[in-house]
Every structure is written in structure tokens, then in C-alpha cells.
Amino acid sequence: MKLDDKVCYCFHISKRKILNHLRIHRPRRASQLSECGGAGTGCGWCVPYLKRYFAESEESGSPDPSDLPQTEEAITAEEYAQQREKYIESGKGVPPA
């Protein structure tokens, strides 16, 4: 996924916004990323990704997203959206109305 791809489809939060939130606000727990526009509080699909971004920022020890390891997910934005759709259809999450 690229920086401007959506991570949280429920609240339209991009990867860039999440990484900037990590850099600026330095949350102490991954769950505090919900303060970034409600990310992770809708259907729940993006929670594993939010946890990973949080862990990567903790491991790097740097508040700057440009210092994070540049490990591009092996998933494209289109594949991510399709997998989320299957997740929703299976009843595992319900997007906000």
C-alpha cells in the first residue's frame, strides 16, 4: 500500500494520516490510533494494520514516518479493498451507518 491509500475505509483515513498521527502525537498504545479520525473503530478490518504501523514506529525509535522501514505491504490497495469487502460480507465487521 502507498501513503495515500486508505487504511480505514469506514472513516477514510489514509496511511499517510496514520503515520503523521504517530509522528505528531506519539501514542503510547496502538489503541490510541483511534484518536486519528476514529481509525479502527468502525468495522475493525484495519486494526491489524494499525497495530503493525504502531509497532513499526516503536521499533524504529523515531517519530518520523520517513525513518520507518520501507516495507511495502505485499498487498495492493485494490486487493486490500477486496479483502475488506469479503470480511464485511462474512459478517465479521459492520461499517458505521
Image: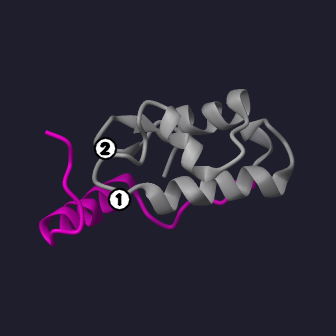
Compared to residue 2, the image places residue 92 above or below, namely below
**Which image quadrant: the C terminus?**
top left
Residue where numbered disc 2 is placed: 9
Q: In percent of the image, x 73 and y 36: which residue is there?
A: 26
The amino acid type, in three-letter code, at marker 1 is Trp
Q: Is residue 63 left or right of residue 17?
A: right
Structure colour scheme:
one colour
Q: In percent of the image, x 41 and y 58: which residue is there?
A: 76
Q: Position of residue 46 (x, y in %)?
A: 41, 55
The amino acid type, in three-letter code, at marker 2 is Tyr
Residue range of the region highlighted in magenta in the rendering: 69-97
SS of the residue at dot 1? loop
Compared to residue 66, the image places residue 82 above or below, namely below
Mark 1–mark 2 distance (CA, rounded to whole Å): 9 Å
User: Dot 1, how many residues are within 10 Å of its Cα: few (below 14), some (14-19), or many (20+)?
Assistant: many
Q: Residue furthest top?
A: 24
Q: Is residue 42 left or right of residue 75?
A: left
User: Dot 2, how many residues are within 10 Å of its Cα: few (below 14), some (14-19), or many (20+)?
Assistant: some
Q: In percent of the image, x 37 and y 46: which residue is there?
A: 41
Compare marks 1 and 2 and give the one earlier in the sequence.
2
The stretch drawn in magenta includes residue 72: yes
Residue where numbered disc 1 is placed: 45
Q: Nearer the viewer, residue 80 or 39?
A: 39
Q: Are marks 1 and 2 in contact (CB under 8 Å)?
A: yes
Q: Is residue 50 left or right of residue 28?
A: left
Compared to residue 23, the image places residue 44 above or below, namely below
Residue 16 lies in what quarter of the image? top right
Q: Position of residue 83 (x, y in %)?
A: 28, 66
Q: In percent of the image, x 20 and y 60: which residue is there?
A: 85
